[in-house]
Image (cartoon, helix red, strand yellow):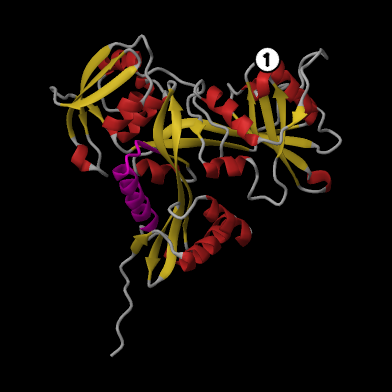
């Protein structure tokens, strides 16, 4: 007698055969060459993908990378989720949601405090407890737009052959920018363009005793009129280094017609551009999901002047085991969320993500319906959760 094939979806880490199918699914969904999709899966490592198997076939999949994200000068354990894809014949059957829920649960058990992703569908991800945390602008400008000051003596720029020096500078500077990533090997490989036919060029402003004052990484792609440079990283520790690196970009004119980069309004590269620049090619929010409120609050960096206690009632449909009354205490730049207290102020993953990230004020969240507290709580919440200009150069 023939045994019926299992129809209940199974979520797992893909083996070699499933990785082949996942690469084909990613290529089809995102318009990538299959070889590039294979490379992206390999860059994420053996535990960096999840798939839904149905009838022994890959019906959906995603990529994930465990990293840290800087908030208030502290590194919060985070997971970067990308490449969420569902086979055409399996769409609108709840597979993406099931895959995401299972992946978030695994990450939570592993001690990850928050998950971060670029959303292609806000409604779906908000339904899973994600909320806007920052904005990424992809802009394109002619090379000459990158040099705004009159010619002056600038420090020398050299070819950088040891990217480890760039990592050292990046780590010292990233803690000053909310939202920046404590990059993993996969993230650095992406910055270096290891997944591309032509890897990144690295240039740097040298500092004393083998250190760097700044560095720039960019790739070249396209042909003819479409040839352009893409800035994958730009870090500077002083104004002269920043000006020298911008001057390099301004001299790319003989090679390219446009320079492209991921940026934000308080990025020093954006600040140094000659404005107005053309309409951004892409303006995309990135979203954050609190997986464990106790761990997230304990790892976050709060304003040093904040000194407050408030009672909250936590509700999370995805992880109801955390539901209950808590006391939130913030002082000396640190936060603590502990069980107990009288409860009262309603809190859930979406408003907490927006408040922690400083994306919107408590009043804005309440008026938008994201937060359901009373107007009397706005001032108290805004004394604890300050506005932040959170952004990151990285795309994933």
Q: How many marks?
A: 1
Q: Which residue lies furthest to the top in this view?
A: 305
Relative to residue 198, is residue 65 drawn left or right?
left
Question: Helix, strand or loop at disc 1?
Answer: helix
Q: Is residue 140 above or below residue 268?
A: below
Q: Residue at 67% across / 50% down in the picture?
A: 196
Q: Is residue 143 visible?
A: yes
- Residue 238 picture quarter: top right
Q: Residues within 10 Å of mark 1 (few under 14, many from 20)?
A: few
Relative to residue 386, is residue 329 drawn left or right?
left
Q: Residue at 20% across / 26% down in the picture?
A: 338
Q: Is residue 396 visible?
A: no
Q: Which residue lies furthest to the front in this view?
A: 209
* Place of residue 138 in the rendered image (x, y in percent of width and height, measured from the top left): 62, 35
* Place of residue 181 in the rendered image (x, y in percent of width and height, measured from the top left): 50, 33
| Residue placed under numbered mark 1 in the picture | 239
- Residue 160 picture quarter: top right
- Residue 4 picture quarter: bottom left
* Place of residue 106 in the rendered image (x, y in percent of width and height, measured from the top left): 32, 48
* Place of residue 168 in the rendered image (x, y in percent of width and height, measured from the top left): 57, 28
Query: Is residue 114 rendered magenta in the image?
Result: yes
Query: Is residue 113 rendered magenta in the image?
Result: yes
Q: Residue at 44% across / 34% down in the picture?
A: 68
Q: The N terminus appears in which quarter of the rendering?
A: bottom left
Q: Residue furthest bottom?
A: 1
Residue span colored magenta? 95-115
Q: Magenta span: helix, strand or loop, mainly?
A: helix
């Amino acid at each position: 007698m023939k045994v019926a094939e299992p129809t209940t979806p199974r979520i797992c880490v893909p083996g070699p055969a499933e990785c082949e199918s996942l690469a084909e699914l990613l290529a089809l969904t995102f318009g990538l060459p299959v070889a590039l999709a294979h490379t992206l899966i390999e860059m994420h490592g053996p535990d960096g993908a999840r798939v839904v198997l149905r009838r022994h076939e890959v019906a959906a999949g995603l990529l994930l990378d465990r990293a840290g994200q800087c908030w208030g000068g502290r590194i919060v354990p985070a997971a970067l989720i990308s490449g969420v894809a569902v086979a055409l014949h399996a769409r609108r059957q709840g597979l993406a949601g099931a895959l995401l829920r299972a992946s978030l649960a695994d990450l939570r058990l592993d001690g990850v405090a928050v998950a971060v992703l670029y959303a292609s569908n806000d409604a779906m991800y908000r339904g899973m407890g994600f909320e806007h945390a920052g904005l990424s602008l992809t802009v394109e400008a002619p090379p000459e737009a990158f040099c705004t000051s009159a010619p002056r003596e600038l420090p020398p720029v050299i070819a950088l052959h040891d990217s480890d020096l760039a990592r050292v500078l990046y780590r010292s500077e990233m803690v000053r920018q909310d939202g920046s990533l404590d990059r993993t090997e996969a993230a650095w490989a992406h910055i270096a363009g290891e997944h591309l036919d032509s890897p990144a060029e690295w240039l740097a402003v040298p500092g004393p005793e083998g250190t760097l004052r700044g560095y720039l990484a960019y790739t070249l792609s396209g042909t003819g009129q479409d040839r352009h440079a893409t800035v994958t990283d730009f870090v500077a520790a002083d104004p002269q280094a920043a000006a020298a690196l911008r001057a390099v970009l301004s001299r790319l004119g003989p090679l390219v017609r446009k320079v492209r980069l991921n940026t934000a309004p308080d990025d020093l590269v954006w600040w140094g551009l000659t404005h107005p620049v053309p309409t951004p090619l892409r303006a995309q929010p990135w979203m954050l999901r609190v997986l464990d409120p106790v761990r997230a609050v304990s790892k976050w960096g709060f304003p040093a002047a904040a000194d407050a206690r408030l009672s909250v009632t936590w509700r999370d449909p995805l992880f109801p085991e955390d539901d209950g009354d808590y006391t939130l205490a913030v002082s000396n730049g640190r936060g603590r969320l502990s069980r107990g207290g009288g409860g009262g102020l309603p809190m859930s993953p979406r408003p907490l993500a927006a408040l922690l990230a400083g994306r919107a004020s408590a009043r804005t969240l309440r008026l938008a319906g994201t937060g359901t507290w009373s107007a009397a709580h706005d001032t108290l919440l805004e004394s604890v959760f300050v506005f932040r200009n959170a952004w990151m150069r990285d795309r994933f």
